[in-house]
Image (cartoon, rainbow, N blue to C red):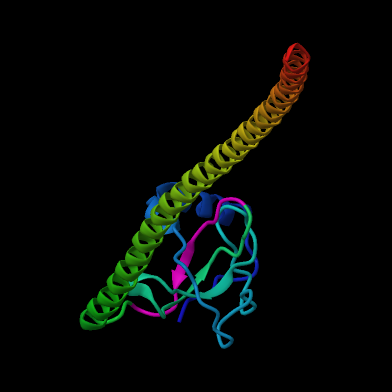
Amino acid sequence: MPSWPNNNETSSDDDEYMSEFSSMQMEYFQTPDTVIDPSFCGLVTESDRRCILHRQRAGKFVAFEGTDTGRRFIGCATEDGVNCGVLEWVDAPWPVILQRCLSKLWDMYHEQNLGRAQDNEAHGIEVAKLQKELDSLANQYSQLVDDVSKLFDYQDGIKSYNMDCTSQAINELKEKKKQLEEQTKIELQMEKLKLKKEQRCI
């Protein structure tokens, strides 16, 4: 269990804390990930223990990272800005065999997460590829629709032209028929007059 200092702290205690802070390694102040444990949480009430940087009341935490998973510690309770990290470990380090097991479990966890990340990345690349192909097909479909529409317009134009030509040809044939009929009538009249003349001569 941690030892708590007396409640009556003086300025010399503050200087001692600052000196302690300046001499410590930065790794000491890296707070591990934590997990909520209802039996060990909240702020420290047994004493007036405060963190080094902010001089605020320390908090109770349970580590959930690496070989320290499950170990209780007293640490900085500040959520905003720089966190002072671990002030004191309540539980001693786990036995070596347990540390190896925890390390193996965390390696498996990170490996699985890495595999998921790689799968998600590959899935994203495949989705982007399919989306690109879909866009290309959509463009080709739009171009095909335009080409078919132009073809229909062209065919309608040809049909209209053919109808105009057919109508003109029919009119010309009617006109020629009329001319031939008139010419035939004239020739018949001429033949009749010729026959009458010949009959008179006889």
Residue sitting at x 56%, y 51%: 82
x 54%, y 56%: residue: 83
The residue stretch that appears in magenta: 81-92
Asked if 40 appears above or below 132 in the picture, the reply is: below
Q: Nearer the viewer, residue 101 or 179?
A: 179
Q: Is 87 positioned to the left or the right of 122 in the image?
A: right
Q: Which x, y percent locates residue 41? A: 59, 79
Is residue 83 part of the magenta span, yes or no?
yes
Q: Picture quarter containing residue 148? A: top right
**What count of labels does the image hold?**
0
Which residue is at the far front? 202
Q: Is residue 72 left or right of residue 76?
A: left
Q: Nearer the viewer, residue 202 or 49?
A: 202
Q: Is residue 117 left or right of residue 77?
A: left
Residue 105 percent across, percent down from the top left: 29, 77
Asked where in the image residue 173 lies, by quadrant, the reply is: top right
Viewport quadrant of the C terminus: top right
Looking at this rendering, what residue extends furthest in the bottom direction?
39
In the image, residue 45 lies in the stretch drawn in magenta: no
**Relative depth, front residue between 3 and 50:** 50
Q: Position of 59 compared to 25: left or right?
A: right
Residue 49 at x, y = what percent?
59, 68
Q: Position of residue 33 (x, y in %)?
A: 47, 68
- Identify the main secondary structure in magenta: loop
Residue shown at 40% from the left, 48% from the top: 23
Q: Is residue 47 above or below residue 8?
A: below
Q: On the rendered image, what quadrant is the N terminus found in? A: bottom left
Q: Nearer the viewer, residue 86 or 4?
A: 86
